Every structure is written in C-alpha cells, then in structure tokens.
Image (tube, rainbow, N blue to C red):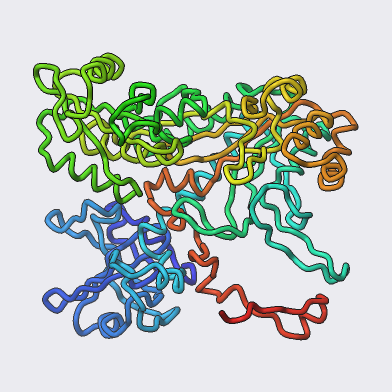
Amino acid sequence: MHRYRSHTCGQLRASDVGTDVRLSGWLHNRRDLGGILFIDLRDHYGITQLVARPGTEAYEALDKLSKETVVRVDGQVVSRGTENVNPDLPTGEVEVEVGAVEVLGAAAPLPFTINAEDGVNEERRLEYRFLDLRRERMHRNIMLRSAVISAIRHKMTALGFNEMATPILSATSPEGARDFVVPSRLNPGKFYALPQAPQQFKQLLMISGFDRYFQIAPCFRDEDARADRSPGEFYQLDVEMSFVEQEDVFLPIEQLMTELFEEFGNGRHVTSPFPRIPFREAMLKYGSDKPDLRAQLELVDITDVFEGSEFKAFAGKHVRALPVPAVQDQPRKFFDQLGEYAISLGAKGLAWVRVAEDGGLTGPIAKFLTEENVKVLTERLGLESGHAVFFGAGEFDEVSKIMGAVRVEAAKRAGHFEENVFRFCWIVDFPMYEKDEDTGAIDFSHNPFSMPQGGLEALETQDPLDILGWQYDIVCNGVELSSGAIRNHEPEIMLKAFEIAGYDRETVEEKFAGMLRAFRFGAPPHGGIAPGVDRIVMLLADEPNIRETISFPLNGNAQDLMMGAPTELEEARLKELHLSVRKPQPK
C-alpha cells in the first residue's frame, strides 16, 4: 500500500465496502455522538467520514488533535446504512472505521474557522491566505479559474491562434497607468518596466508575420484597487490578429465567450449574438459605456422638451427620463427609496411622476409640467396607465452616471431585471478625441494607438471631436471585460493623430521609435483585444470582488500581508543596484 494513501477523500463509494484503505488529509470537523467519534477528513478531492470507537488507539489519537491537523489513517470501509446516508457528499453512503492514525502535520490554534463562512475580515483572510484557500468556496473558485484558463487555451488553439510568450522585463509602456520599475544592476541608473500589457510586443509579432497570437498574459500596473480590479498584477487573454477589420476580431471572441460562459455558467443563459452599441448611444440609453443589459429599461434624452421652460429644476440643463412600466401597485416607499438611492450617488433628489388611469400625470413635479410637456412626454416615452417616469437633470456626465445607476436599481425593484443570464454587448465607435474641460486642449479619449475611422483624410478634414476610432469594448452584465482596437499601423496617420493631441513629430519619433521603425518595414493591418481572465472568473463564480478569484492577491493598499511585501532593501543591495532611497517627509 502507498505510504500516504490508497484512495482520495472523494473517491470511496458503496462498492468499496469491506475494503482496507489508507487516507490522508486535513481534520476538517469532529463530532462526538454518544461516545463515538465522527471525523470529516478533507483533501483536494472531497470529504470522507471517519468513525473511531471508544477504547481504541484511533479514538485516543483523534480526540486530542486540533482541527486542520494533517493525518494519515488506516481503516476499513463500512456502510453508513440507509438512514444515515449523506446525500450532499459523493462519499455519503460509506464511512471508514479507523484502526491506525499517524500525524503528518500538526496544526496550531486557528485564527478563524475553516469549515464555516464566518464574518472574518478580509485583511485577516489575506494574512492567512493559505488557510482561507482551504475553505470550500475559495477552493472552488480557484479550481474554476484553473478550468477556465485550460478551456481558453484549448478553444483558442482550436480557433487557429498560436500561444506565444512576450517579455516581462521591458521598457516603459504607453498604456497610461503607472509602471512598476525594476532597477538594472548591469546598467547603473537605468530601469526596466514590468509590462502593463504586451501591447507593443504582440503588434510586433503581427509585423513579424505570425498572423494569430494569444497569451494568458501577466500584466502589472501600479494603480488603485477596485472591486473589479486587483492592484499590482492581473492576467488577461491577450489576442492579436493580422489582416482583420473590427468584425473579424469580434467573431472568434464572441464564439469563445459564448462557449466559455455556457460551459462554466451553471446553466445561466448566454444571449447571442452580442449587440453592437455605439458609445454615444450607450451613454444616452444606459448612462454608461458598460451597460448592464439585464435591466430591461432605457433612458430617454428629453432635454429639448424643457428648452426655454420656466421649470427651473430642468431649464438649461441636460434632462434624462426613465420610464418604468407596471408600477401601479408600487407604494410611495418605492419612489422614496429610489430617491434616497439617487441621493447616495450624489444627486440632489429624484423627480418623478406617475401616469393615472385617465392618462394624466400625478406626483411631486406634475404641477410644473405644461399640457404640451405632458403631450410630448406621453408620445415620446410611450406612457400608459401604470407607468412611472423618473427624471435626472444636470451636466451630461453627472446625469449619465446617476441615472444609469438608477436605471439598474429601478429595474431590480420593479421586476424588470433578468436573473440567471449573461448579457454581453460590444460598445463600438468611441470618440477618438475629447476636450479637456479645464484647458480646452484636445487629447485622446480612449486609445491613442487605434486607427481613426476615415484614416488620414478624417484627421485632416474633420473636427477632431467628430472623429471616431476603430475601438471597442466587450461588456457582460455591466462589467467591462476588455478594450480592444484595430491598430494604427501607418506611420503618417499615427504622427498626424498625435499632432492633433498636441505631440510634435520629434517627441513621437523619440517616444515610440521601436514601433514606428517596425511600421516602416511593412506592417499588416492588425487588431486585437485582451479580455481580463480575473473578471471572467469573477462573473462565472458570481463573486462581487475580484480578489475572491485570485489565489494570492494584494490588499487594497497593494500589500501582500501573507509574505510581507513590499519590503525594504538592505544597504548592501541598494549599493549593488546603484540606488539610494528618499522617503517622503512626514506632514
């Protein structure tokens, strides 16, 4: 028999009754029932119940051991009997009557409970992450992640893509976030940068003639944490394709996402094909460029209805309306709570009206609406008896943010929200440029290395604020999974695009010398995308925080509480790297 086990803790079945077995694992739980000791023994594969009877060496040993001690047990498989079967366990028809016990790894007192989801705070969980990962939910999430990545590799290869690796030590990236830098011992005073993304290298692979590339790529960005973004490092499915237009990128990614979310989504439906929604339309209808399409309500721009109006709350402002059908049975509390929600987002309040049976409008602001207002609103919003309308007014961006969130919340509260589905969409036609509100200067709004729609002619003849880029995002259930673009592969178009944003030719030639040099030696049209692996798994696991799907994440302050990183360097090491440290002065 093997030194540690003949079977795993998830393997034994009724057909094994009478078999002598050896198991190894963690002491998950212990119960003393009428003097008989029952132990749940856990390993990677599952749980097997052990039984130890009074007066045996096994009983004496197991009764004293702390939870999470690692043991090896020898015993015989016995039937639990029909009345004692545990239907929640694959091993639930049997148990192992223990004859011998060997302690393989003693466990100190635990800082929190492993076999229950108690309310321990996240900092404590991250400090003892190796224990946290023993919990069933966390173990399941990490195994889901492993299976998803394995499936991605298989599916991408089947779609004709080739997996390739790109450098980790590189130069500063133009991605936009802060780089993590690594000092060079052999080149005093110089630094490598960890890649924010393999953007330039994957484009260079296209220029080198490899046609279809993918990589499960580690990316490093010195940026703040969010619920859907881990600080420090993350992983993305990095993809690039040659001789493609926008739709050519969409097709394989749409197929991949559909298959992936159907395979691992626990029966949740994936809507396909994914709708293509222009950026400006998304902002008007949904108040967001990452709309949650499970909410079956849309915003309507009614700014023109109140132009010149005497109703000061709306006059001279951008006004958005949210019609919500079938609220005739909703109490006043429904309206008040939505108003409180809007205030929590920064609104001063939330105006609303309700459509009465005779078609008239009632509610706090009904008296301020003229007959013409009511007529236009009724026609444009398709109002009928039982509808309600919520209004937001102010600056465009402010109204979009608040009313976009109210749209989703109202849909949930009023029964217009789809559950158990994955609603994907593509957001397309992003503006190439935007105007800085403070300086009035023109700058890139999304991705400076995208091909402008209309090419060089558009850059030379159109108002920059009217130029769109071949840029796109893929969104699922209100979560942006990725941005992508058809790349600007022509040097003169790239130089002109940067000139409009205030960069002179010499600066661009110097800053992006490597890419421009490559473009001048025959570059194919190419484009790509890079969906976030962490966010994909977060959606599939139905977790609200991305850290719940990563084995060893940093905390919100980009610290590894378990390993104690980041750390200070000893003086000898600093000297070897030609560095001195200047700490910030206390305030």
Q: Which image quarter holds the C terminus?
A: bottom right
Q: Position of residue 504 (x, y in %)?
A: 82, 41
In the picture, residue 565 is in which quadrant?
A: bottom right
Q: Residue at x 64, y 31 (%)?
A: 432
Relative to 336, 323 lies left or right: right
Question: 128 or 94: which is nearer to us?
Answer: 128
From the viewer's perspective, tell me whether residue 23 is left or right of residue 30: right
Identify whether 54 is placed above or below 238. Answer: below
Q: Is residue 315 left or right of residue 33?
A: right
On the image, the x and y values in percent for residue 449 come to: 72, 36
Residue under the point 33% across and 36% down: 392
* Residue 55 or residue 338, whichever sits in front: 338
| Residue at image coords 14%, 79% | 35
Image coordinates for residue 577, horizontal then vertical, percent: 81, 75
Q: Nearer the viewer, residue 579 or 262?
A: 579
Q: Would residue 101 be visible to someone looking at this image?
A: yes
Number of numbered callouts drawn: 0
Q: Where does residue 407 sit, x and y in percent of width and height?
A: 32, 35
Q: Residue at x 80, y 27 (%)?
A: 524
* Residue 477 visible to an observer of this rendering: no
